[in-house]
Image: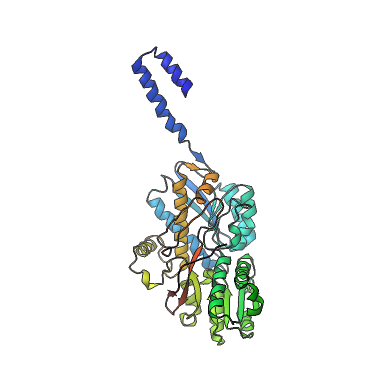
């Protein structure tokens, strides 16, 4: 730029007016150089194309509501003009919660559809199947829709980041409560036989510590392909356990609640957050059969009457009515998708015109005290290059037959 300025100045032969003009031209050109745009595949001046896989079919299809909510939220953002002038196009493909299908669909998204990155694909086993592939290609696997602890490992998988509180932390909080309030408990555990279920089991074992072997009477696992968990519930009851830790997805959580009630088993029942949606789980199981169940929350439960006059909740209701009509107002996954998509929009805003894959991850790891309207008061999103756990706080809640009633304070778990 200086060489060009000198040549213009010489050409001006000392003319002050022409020299001033040369300076103005040079300075005008400088911002354009500094603001050079950087785009990943799938990004243009008008659009950002991203992809995901969701279980829209199969045994885990209740979780597909998350993807539909994200599509609905991004439709609202696009109607408002997009982010920094660009519309967001989310290609959301069905994988049926089958890891081989997830691999097939993700390869299609990356190699054929040329998406910029993968956003909020759902499921621990499905995401495990694509984690190495995406990291080798340096493609962001952003805000994975599962709470497995493995998504917070920037040293080994710098292109993968989770979002929700991880399962190990959640289970440790349940263990802490059991130790404080039922120290002589006999515990029975049902868990899904994959990384999702085993993460919760590891957290429970860590939380109970040296008392785990004494307090846990038995564990039973199930496969996603199993038709029911009825026999497992009968076997767990037979141990005489008075505490039941239920680590099941929506379909099997509903079966477990119903079967336990029907055979007269009334333990203190802890239900993992993944399987605790009122609309997808408790209503099919029977609200009267779900009374007393304890779980954890980090978001404003849409069934909780305390939020009826809350401006953020009213905004969510308005969005549901306009952009997600027909979806259940009692379904937690419609809040989850709303929050996840809102976090994505914040990251893209921070990216500005540098929408390279590297900067997407850089900004995702640069979120500070982000308070989303539909998170519980006091719970914020925080990340750093060495901390890929956006949410690290939870609050215990108990179902009263109509809604989840909070009790106690917000609890932060330190890994």
Image quadrant of residue 268? Answer: bottom right
- Expressed as whole percent of the image width and height from the top left, the position of residue 226 reads 63, 73
**Image vertical order of residue 262 relative to residue 349, above or below:** below
Q: Is residue 315 left or right of residue 2?
A: left
What residue is rendered at 45% in x and 70% in y? Answer: 409
Which one is in front, 309 or 216? 216
Q: Residue at 50%, 48% (x, y): give it.
A: 363
Tell me where residue 97 sits by quadrant.
bottom right
Q: How many marks on residues?
A: 0
- Front in this rendered view, residue 273 or 105: 273
Question: At 56% from the left edge and 77% from the top edge, which residue is drawn?
Answer: 179
Residue at the top extreme of this rendering: 13
The part of the image, by quadrant, that contains residue 238 is: bottom right
Q: Residue furthest bottom?
A: 264
Which quarter shows the C terminus? bottom right
The reply to whether residue 217 is visible in this rendering is no
In the image, residue 389 above or below residue 227: above
The way the protein has been coloured in the rendering is rainbow
Q: Measuring 52% from the left and 69% from the top, which residue is drawn there?
A: 273
Q: Give the percent coordinates (x, y) of residue 64.
A: 51, 64
User: Can residue 244 be seen?
Assistant: yes
Q: Position of residue 231 (x, y in %)?
A: 63, 81
């Amino acid at each position: 730029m200086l060489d060009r300025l000198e040549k213009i100045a010489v050409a001006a032969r000392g003319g002050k007016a022409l020299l001033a003009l040369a300076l103005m031209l040079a300075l005008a050109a400088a911002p354009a150089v500094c603001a050079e745009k950087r785009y990943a595949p799938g990004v243009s001046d008008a659009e950002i194309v991203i992809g995901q896989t969701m279980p829209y079919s199969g045994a885990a299809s209740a979780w597909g509501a998350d993807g539909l909510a994200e599509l609905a939220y991004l439709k609202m953002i696009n109607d408002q003009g997009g982010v920094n002038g660009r519309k967001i196009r989310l290609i959301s493909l069905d994988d049926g919660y089958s890891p081989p299908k997830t691999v097939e669909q993700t390869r299609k998204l990356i190699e054929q559809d040329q998406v910029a990155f993968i956003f909020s694909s759902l499921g621990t086993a499905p995401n495990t199947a694509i984690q190495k592939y995406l990291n080798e290609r340096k493609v962001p696997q952003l805000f994975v829709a599962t709470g497995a602890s493995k998504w917070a490992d920037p040293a080994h998988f710098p292109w993968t980041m989770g979002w929700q509180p991880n399962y190990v932390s959640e289970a440790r909080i349940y263990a802490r409560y059991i130790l404080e309030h039922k120290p002589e408990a006999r515990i029975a555990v049902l868990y899904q036989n994959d990384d999702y279920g085993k993460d919760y089991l590891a957290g429970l074992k860590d939380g109970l510590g040296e008392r785990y072997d004494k307090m846990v009477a038995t564990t039973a696992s199930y496969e996603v392909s199993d038709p029911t968990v009825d026999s497992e519930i009968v076997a767990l009851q037979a141990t005489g356990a008075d505490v039941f830790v239920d680590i099941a997805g929506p379909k099997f959580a509903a079966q477990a609640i119903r079967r336990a009630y029907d055979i007269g088993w009334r333990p203190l029942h802890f239900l993992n957050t993944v399987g605790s949606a009122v609309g997808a789980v408790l209503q099919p199981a029977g609200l009267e059969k779900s009374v007393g169940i304890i779980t954890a929350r980090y978001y404003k439960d849409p069934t909780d009457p305390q939020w009826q006059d809350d401006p953020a909740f009213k905004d969510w209701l308005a969005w549901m009515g306009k952009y997600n009509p027909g979806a259940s107002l009692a379904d937690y996954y419609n809040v989850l998708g709303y929050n996840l998509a809102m976090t994505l929009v914040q990251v893209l805003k921070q990216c500005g015109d540098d929408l390279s894959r590297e900067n997407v991850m850089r900004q995702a790891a640069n979120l500070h005290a982000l308070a989303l309207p539909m998170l519980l008061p006091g719970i914020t999103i925080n990340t750093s290059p060495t901390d890929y756990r956006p949410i690290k706080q939870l609050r215990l809640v108990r179902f009263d037959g109509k809604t989840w009633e909070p009790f106690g304070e917000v609890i932060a778990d330190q890994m």
